């Protein structure tokens, strides 16, 4: 049977993701969805897909090998994982034609952490609670609906035919974060309970992305932050929430975060800042920059406008 | 009850109804849930009620934060408590043991009890399910006897086994799935809370009651419980 593509070798982590699972967070089910939603959307845009169509989120690369069984056009965006098509290098932010027998391989990251591979019409996968997003911890979504990451022998298929080539608009290619990358944080939640010195440190000192980082959250290491609040009542957590446990080291909560939690928070990173953070390799130095909700919203609406026809 | 509204993200606000956990909060939280759903309609992306708060995640393409705040205040004006139907009572068997409940000694010491007395105290109450959250089917319950109240771990564990029963302050809960967490773990149950087959249908619902019952290792194993010790992974 030739579905479209078969996984010949699994890398460290490749997941089927879409725009996320919404309307079920009151059951304790997380948001999920592409962590760098901006690159993910550009990958779909390159094929003329609806922007939240299911695609692959490939973390690190690390030898993931896919063999083509059906000729089509695919698109790649996000991290540069030194991807090759039969040894010819592929550039993120482009689409490319593939023929049966060709092999697509992802290697080590050169810039960024997560690459997005889009398919015409979106990857075929069952909808679970309204989404195809794969959440390994919850065992929901993904290729078979049971939350498993891509494994050797998995077959990928998609409903669409090869679209015409489309190129990114000038300057639209998402830039992978570099040292000193600035992440916008909308202050709020329990920020008033942090000491003045802690707030000064939050916004004026460098933070390093810890190696304890995944789709649930990313720890930042740096100065110790102190909050006067103890024994907080657990409450809902928005995307990008910056929580500070008693050890004083913040954790930014991303797409697969717990829905409710009880650590005090400084506020939340904007969705665009979350997308950047999701591309930071461990050790990357980042800066937190305060941004009001109106200003953050304007920037967000400008980003969304980039995809309007 | 005067609701307060906090900005909590670019496209989310927190409605705060109470400052402390109380079983009588439930009727108000459920009423606010209904009122906010109606008021936001299509502009609502997700609504996460908890013990004292409701997180409103709205579509920022339709609303700015000031409009969202005004809409919430309007929705909550003249709010009356909802009828809370008598929830189901679930009896949950738990194997309390240090190998799967490493904080038994810590919580017992703080309470000035021996471990046996601590277990008896934890089983001696029908807990109210206040909210579902943190993970699918994870029911936040309370209120735990004041003597047993223990703050969360300074650094959360990266892996807490499915079925782990824990305490954080005056809350108690069961981890439905393997996940990170910072609660004080006392034991483990073999009862599934969010099975694959139960997808979208968690065992516990807000308003239900839960009573824990201490069982032996043999009973736990007979129920299909996993006796692998809870290991700390740095």
Image: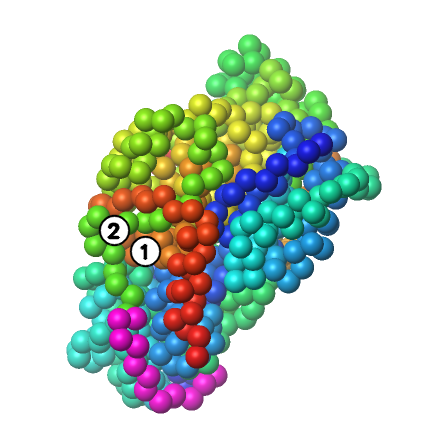
Residue A9 point in image, percent of width and height = 30, 69
Q: In which quarter of the image is the N terminus of chain A?
A: bottom left
Q: Quadrant of the C terminus of chain A?
A: bottom left
Asked whether residue B51 is in view, the answer is no
Q: Do the residues labelled 2 and 1 touch (CB within 8 Å)?
A: yes
Q: Is the magenta stretch mostly helix, strand or loop?
A: loop
Q: Mark 2 points at which residue?
A: A181
Tell me: B85 left or right of A287: right
Picture residue at 41% right of the left edge, 86% below the top: A2
> Against B154, is A284 above or below?
below
Question: Judging from the image, what secondary structure is the residue with disc 2 in?
Answer: strand
Q: Residue at x 36, y 72 (%)?
A: A42
Instruction: Judge whether A2 appears above or below A178 on screen.
Output: below
Q: Are marks 2 and 1 on the same chain?
A: yes
Within the image, what quadrant is residue A109 found in? bottom left
Can residue A4 be seen here? The reply is yes
Q: What is the chain identity of the residue bearing mark 2?
A: A
Q: What stretch is highlighted in magenta?
A: A159-172
Disc tally is 2
The crowd level at tag 2 (other Cα within 10 Å; few <14, some 14-19, many 20+) is some
Mark 1 Cα-neighbour bin, 10 Å: few <14, some 14–19, many ≥20: many
Q: How far apart are marks 2 and 1 (CA)?
A: 8 Å
**Residue A170 in magenta stretch:** yes
> Could you tell whether B31 is left or right of A125 in the image?
right
Mark 1: secondary structure:
helix
Residue at 66 percent of width and 36 percent of height:
B3
Indicate which disc residue B152 carries: none
Q: Where is residue A284 in the image (x, y as percent from the top left)?
A: 22, 48
Question: Is residue A303 highlighted in magenta?
Answer: no
Tag 1 residue:
A276
């Amino acid at each position: 049977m030739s579905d479209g593509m078969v996984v010949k070798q699994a890398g460290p982590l490749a997941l089927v993701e879409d725009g996320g699972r919404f309307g079920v967070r009151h059951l304790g089910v997380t948001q999920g969805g592409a962590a760098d939603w901006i690159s993910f959307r550009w990958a779909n845009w390159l094929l003329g897909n609806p922007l939240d169509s299911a695609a692959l989120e490939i973390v690190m690369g690390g030898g993931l090998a896919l063999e083509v069984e059906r000729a089509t056009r695919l698109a790649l965006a996000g991290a540069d994982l030194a991807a090759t098509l039969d040894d010819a290098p592929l550039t993120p932010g482009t689409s490319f034609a593939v023929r049966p027998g060709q092999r697509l391989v992802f290697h080590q990251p050169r810039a960024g952490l997560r690459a997005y591979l889009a398919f015409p019409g979106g990857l075929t996968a069952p909808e679970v609670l309204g989404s195809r997003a794969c959440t390994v911890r919850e065992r929901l979504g993904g290729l078979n609906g049971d939350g498993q990451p891509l494994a050797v022998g998995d077959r990928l298929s998609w409903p669409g035919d090869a679209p015409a080539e489309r190129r990114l608009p000038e300057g639209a290619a998402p830039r992978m974060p570099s040292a000193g990358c600035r992440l916008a944080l909308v202050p709020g939640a329990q920020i008033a309970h942090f000491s003045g010195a802690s707030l000064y440190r939050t916004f004026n000192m460098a933070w390093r992305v810890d190696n304890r980082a995944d789709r649930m959250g990313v720890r930042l290491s740096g100065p110790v932050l102190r909050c006067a609040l103890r024994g907080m009542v657990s409450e809902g957590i928005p995307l990008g929430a910056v929580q500070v446990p008693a050890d004083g080291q913040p954790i930014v909560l991303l797409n697969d975060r717990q829905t409710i939690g009880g650590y005090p928070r400084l506020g939340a990173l904007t969705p665009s800042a979350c997308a950047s953070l999701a591309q930071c390799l461990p050790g990357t130095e980042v800066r937190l920059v305060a941004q009001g909700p109106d200003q953050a919203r304007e920037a967000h609406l400008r980003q969304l406008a980039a995809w309007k026809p | 009850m005067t609701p307060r509204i906090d900005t909590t993200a670019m496209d989310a606000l927190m409605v705060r109804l109470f400052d402390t956990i109380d079983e009588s909060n439930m009727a108000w939280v459920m009423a606010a849930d209904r009122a906010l759903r109606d008021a936001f309609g299509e502009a609502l992306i997700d609504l996460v009620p908890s013990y004292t708060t409701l997180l409103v995640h709205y579509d920022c393409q339709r609303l700015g934060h000031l409009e969202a705040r005004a809409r919430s205040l309007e929705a909550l004006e003249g709010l009356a408590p909802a009828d809370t139907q008598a929830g189901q009572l679930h009896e949950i068997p738990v194997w309390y043991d240090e190998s799967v409940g490493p904080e038994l000694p810590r919580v017992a010491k703080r309470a000035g009890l021996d471990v046996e007395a601590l277990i008896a105290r934890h089983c001696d109450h029908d807990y109210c399910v206040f909210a579902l959250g943190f993970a699918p089917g994870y029911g936040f319950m309370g209120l735990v006897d004041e003597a047993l109240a223990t703050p969360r771990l300074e650094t959360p564990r990266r892996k807490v086994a499915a079925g782990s029963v824990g305490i954080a302050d005056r809350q108690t809960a069961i981890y439905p799935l393997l996940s990170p967490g910072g609660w004080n773990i006392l034991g483990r149950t073999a009862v599934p809370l969010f099975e694959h087959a139960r997808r979208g249908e968690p065992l516990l619902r807000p308003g239900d009651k839960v009573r824990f019952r201490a069982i032996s290792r043999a009973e736990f194993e007979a129920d299909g419980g996993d006796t692998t010790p809870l290991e700390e992974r740095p």
